[in-house]
Image (cartoon, rainbow, N blue to C red):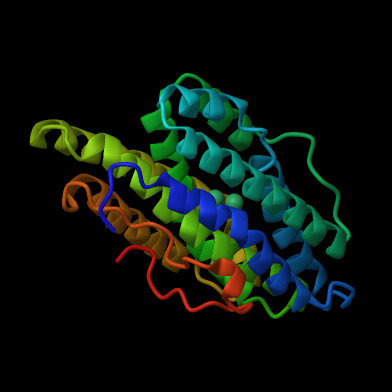
Amino acid sequence: MESTAPFTAWVDYFTRNGVRQERIEATVDWNAPCTLPPDARAAIARSLQRFELGESGEGTHLLGLAERAGDPAYVDAVRLLIAEEQRHSALFGRGLRHLMAPSLPGHWTDRSFTLLRRSLGLDTEIALFLVAETVALDWFEALAASPDPVLAGIGRRIVADEREHIRFQIDRLHLDLRRRSAVARLGIAVVWSTVAVGAATVLVVGHAEAMRACGSRPAAVWTRGLHTFARSARTVLTGPVGRVLGPSVVRPDLVGPLPRIDTVVR
Ligand SMILES: [Fe+2]
Ligand SMILES: [Fe+2]
């Protein structure tokens, strides 16, 4: 796909994606009892509590920045993306009720991330979004492989969305950053990678017990998350000028509950 205004395809994708989300959710037996041992339940609950908070924002600041970018299709796509993130928060809440755990009123990682983002421009905010989504993707994949069917369903549902979110953020950043000079892009790569290493470390340290409870090694989540970040950043900064990824699933409403999406970045 080659275009200077790629976001109408994204609006179309996000608009249709609700059908796929419902199909995935219909495969989950939401009333299945939780059979995990108490320590595993507690560890996973602590992780879901933070994600429930982190994805609950109304995105007012991000939408304001998107409006200034001057592309109405992009604004519509961001609005639909924020709605998907809020549904992720609701899914994490559903997981907490399944684990019989409460929601959190607030957490320092969420407050710091929100404060940091408020002081930034669109590209920097999206760059941070991309860091958060790439380093966490492998943890959601571990959740999708959890022995608990409800948690696994939540993981499958979120992974299917997040893989597309990563492509969406790449398209915006590529459009804005790829034309900068080689020196500027090198500087961006250095700072961005440092932030990604820090974010992956905070994630893995904070959620290590939950990762182990789902049968995943925290060090492997750290490595794979940073690998996904590196591939995404490379596509943004060095991919062919004007190249647009677009959604990997053009008609998500026609795709079954477990779509084949083998790569985040092609
Ligand atoms: Fe999300
Ligand atoms: Fe996302």
Q: Position of residue 256 (x, y in %)?
A: 61, 79
Among the 4 quarters of the image, the one containing residue 237: top left
- The structure residue drawn at horizontal position 45% and vertical position 73%, both measured from the top left corner, is 261
Residue closer to the observer: 39 or 189: 189
Q: Quarter of the image for the N terminus: give it.
A: bottom left
Q: In this view, does 125 lie to the left or right of 86?
A: left
Tell me how many marks there are.
0
Q: Where is residue 6 in the image (x, y as percent from the top left)?
A: 36, 47
**In the image, is residue 244 above or below residue 126?**
below
- The structure residue drawn at horizontal position 60% and vertical position 45%, both measured from the top left corner, is 80
- The structure residue drawn at horizontal position 48% and vertical position 46%, both measured from the top left corner, is 132
Q: Where is residue 36 in the image (x, y as percent from the top left)?
A: 79, 75
The answer to whether any part of residue 209 appears in the image is no
The answer to whether any part of residue 92 appears in the image is yes
Residue closer to the observer: 95 or 70: 70
- The structure residue drawn at horizontal position 28% and vertical position 35%, both measured from the top left corner, is 176
Q: Where is residue 186 in the image (x, y as percent from the top left)?
A: 15, 38
- Report the residue that reaches farthest toward the top: 119
Residue closer to the observer: 188 or 112: 188
Among the 4 quarters of the image, the one containing residue 246: bottom left
Q: Quarter of the image for the C terminus: give it.
A: bottom left
Among the 4 quarters of the image, the one containing residue 173: top left
Q: In this view, does 196 lie to the left or right of 231?
A: right
Q: In this view, does 27 lie to the left or right of 204?
A: right
